[in-house]
Image (tube, grey):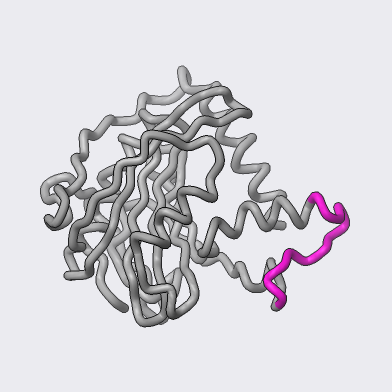
Amino acid sequence: MVVAAALAAVLGGCAEAADDGKRAASPSASAKGAAAGGTAGKGTAAARGGTIGPAGSACELPVRFGVAERWTAEAVDAEKELGTSGKPARGEDGDLGGALADAFLRQGPVTMACEIDAKPAGHIGYLRVWTGKPGDADAGSVLRRFVAAEDNVGKEKYHSFRTGGGLAAVEVEYLYTSKLLEETKKESAFAVSTPDGPVILHLGGMDTEEHEGMRPAYDLAKQTLALS
């Protein structure tokens, strides 16, 4: 199921990108990151449409934060998909399916816990939440291992800030080159430490224009993120 979803997301995104001329262009947003040692930037956040993280929300997480209007969140049960051993369950497609599931659900020291889709808001991309095990408390180290586990990245720029909820965080902006699409795009992520383990929020997008258009939703998460 996870493999099919991953492939559908890639192929569906390509189809929508090719059909760009038939839809309105995505609004671009220039969102500046917080300076080192500062706090989450103000004035760039999207309108808030809800909150995820607390018990009873779409995704129950060690942190809570605001979700932009029309963005839809869905929990990802990585433990179920990967199995209790931490290895992908062997499906009908054998090792290939297991490898794809592992690559999709796990990146470095963290596994995917929540996927927030921008499509209902008119963008092609996701804000994904990744969580790690308790005891891995160094947010900066976890974030660097997360980025290192993603192939074809470069020009990483790290800095520290505090979320709107007062948590110390480390953020990175970098470039990712897709071998499949032969394109380079901007990506962003930030990490915080919690008593239940590290949490990473990652913003991708079909391309850099889509990424910038989704930045207000990412900034909303930065400005509202606190412990659940």
User: Which residue is painted at 45% across and 48% down in the image?
Assistant: 126
User: Which residue is painted at 31% across and 64% down in the image?
Assistant: 50
Give yes or no for residue 87 being in the magenta stretch.
yes
Give residue 85's position: percent from left, percent from top: 72, 75
Closer to us: 160 or 166: 160
Quadrant location, the N terminus: bottom right
Q: Which residues are magenta?
A: 85-96
Instruction: From this view, report whether residue 133 is shown above or below residue 23.
Output: below
Q: Residue furthest top?
A: 21
User: Which residue is painted at 30% across and 42% down in the image?
Assistant: 157
Main SS, magenta region, reads loop
| Left or right of 183, for residue 201 | left
Instruction: From this view, report whether residue 172 is shown above or below residue 135.
Output: above
Give residue 17's position: percent from left, percent from top: 51, 26
User: Which residue is painted at 78% across and 66% down in the image?
Assistant: 89
Give yes or no for residue 173 being in the magenta stretch.
no
Give residue 49's position: percent from left, percent from top: 29, 58
| Left or right of 94, for residue 183 | left
Quadrant location, the C terminus: bottom left
Which quadrant would residue 10 be assigned to in this image?
A: top right
| Residue 176 visible in the shown view | yes
